[in-house]
């Protein structure tokens, strides 16, 4: 996907949100129109839109959607605040969602309702534009860390579909490919919803970047065989002591450390939660059907309980470097200077 290909954007004609429905990939590319906060919350919960930076944009657009949809000047502040909190609760682990929501809310504080509607839309659009610029900067800063010739392992989807466009981890890969580096990608399928197989492999094959899909538990064996040169993943939240990303990331980080393979995290500074530590964060747990009814087929006997964390936490001592749009950060990690405004 080129930088012109959008994952989520604002429709000025209808004052609505347009997005790629990621649950339909890779079978078909479907764009849906969101006209209410309730439908946007549903799209977030059902992973029609997902990925930390994209959720930041979605949260921003959600506040704008609430603002332009509100017909009561008297209840404007109350309505927008309630809708913002409703959206905030849909995904508790990824920090960007709340960041996007709060940034738009701050932009319309104490404004008359008609002016607030204008500024809400303008601010949300700017967040989307800034996300694109951020991904491009991050991609080119991180590309220099990737081998001239080699194989990169990635987990889940930190590509254009997880952002406005271009991507973070895949943004590094796209940028390296554009610079002429001869790299190939191993994409973990990423159970239970196969974001690596359905989304990452789709993105990279669409861009003619060599990609091979594996089951998640294959990665360690390939590392031992010397077939992986580095690992690059995204992040849903960066705290003082850990990286929160799709479940399975911690396992890859341990394996990479054991095999002396660089483990890189591509994360915009909007993902940094500079005051928090791992113990402060609620890790989202998702429903039984994702495991017990795998894509419509029963895969677990009735009555057998499941554990289905959406994310895990990787201690920073397993991370070789964190690549942001501002700089590449190396140990010892200190994220205190990246406080968001």
Image: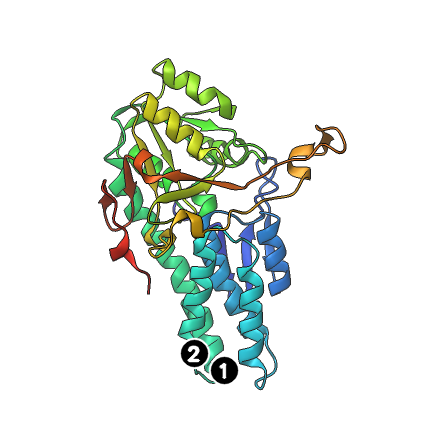
Asked which quadrant contains residue 221, the reply is top left
Tag shown at residue 114:
1
If the image is split into quadrants, where does the N terminus sit? top left
Residue at the spot 53% in from the left edge and 67% down from the top edge: 84
Q: Is residue 80 above or below residue 46?
A: below
Q: Secondary structure at mark 1?
A: helix
Q: Is residue 82 above or below residue 262?
A: below
Q: Position of residue 201 (x, y in %)?
A: 48, 31
Foreground of the two, 92 or 125: 92
Q: Earlier in the sequence, mark 2 or mark 1?
A: 2
Label 1 CA crowd tier, 10 Å (few <14, some 14–19, many 20+): few
Q: Residue furthest right?
A: 302
Q: Residue furthest front?
A: 279
Report how far apart the C-alphas of labels 2 and 1 lie in the structure: 12 Å
Q: Position of residue 267 (x, y in %)?
A: 35, 46
Q: Secondary structure at mark 2?
A: loop
Q: Position of residue 183 (x, y in %)?
A: 33, 26
Q: Is 112 displayed left or right of 301 in the figure?
A: left
Q: Is 112 displayed left or right of 266 in the figure?
A: right
Q: Please name the residue that numbered disc 2 is placed on.
A: 109
Q: Nearer the viewer, mark 2 or mark 1?
A: 2
Q: Is residue 1 above or below residue 177?
A: below
Foreground of the two, 237 or 239: 239
């Amino acid at each position: 996907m080129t930088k012109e290909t959008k994952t989520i954007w604002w429709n000025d004609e209808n004052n609505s949100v347009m997005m790629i429905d990621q649950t339909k990939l890779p079978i078909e590319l479907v764009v849906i129109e969101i006209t209410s906060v309730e439908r946007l919350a549903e799209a977030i919960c059902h992973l029609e839109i997902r990925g930390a930076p994209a959720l930041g944009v979605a949260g921003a657009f959600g506040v704008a959607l609430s603002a332009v949809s509100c017909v009561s000047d008297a209840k404007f502040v109350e309505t927008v605040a309630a809708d913002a909190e409703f959206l905030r609760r849909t995904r508790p682990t990824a920090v960007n969602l709340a960041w996007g929501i709060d940034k738009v809310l701050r932009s319309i504080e104490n404004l008359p309702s008609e002016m607030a509607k204008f500024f809400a839309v303008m601010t949300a659009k700017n967040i989307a534009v800034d996300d694109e610029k951020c991904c491009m900067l991050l991609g080119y800063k991180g590309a220099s860390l990737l081998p001239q010739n080699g194989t990169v392992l990635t987990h889940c989807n930190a590509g254009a579909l997880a952002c406005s466009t271009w991507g973070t981890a895949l943004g590094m890969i796209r940028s390296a490919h554009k610079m002429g580096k001869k790299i190939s990608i191993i994409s973990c399928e990423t159970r239970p919803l196969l974001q690596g197989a359905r989304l990452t492999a789709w993105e990279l094959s669409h861009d003619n970047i060599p990609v091979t899909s594996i089951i998640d538990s294959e990665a360690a064996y390939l590392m031992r065989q010397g077939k992986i040169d580095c690992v690059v993943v995204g992040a849903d939240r960066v705290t003082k002591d850990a990286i929160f990303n799709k479940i399975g990331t911690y396992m890859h980080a341990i394996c990479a450390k054991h095999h002396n393979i660089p483990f890189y995290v591509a994360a915009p500074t909007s993902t940094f939660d500079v005051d928090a530590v791992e113990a402060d964060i609620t890790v989202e747990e998702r429903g039984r059907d994702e495991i017990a009814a795998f894509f419509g087929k029963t895969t677990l006997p009735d009555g057998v309980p499941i554990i289905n964390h959406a994310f895990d936490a990787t201690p920073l001592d397993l991370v070789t470097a964190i690549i942001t749009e501002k700089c590449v950060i190396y140990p010892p990690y200190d994220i205190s200077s990246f406080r968001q405004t």
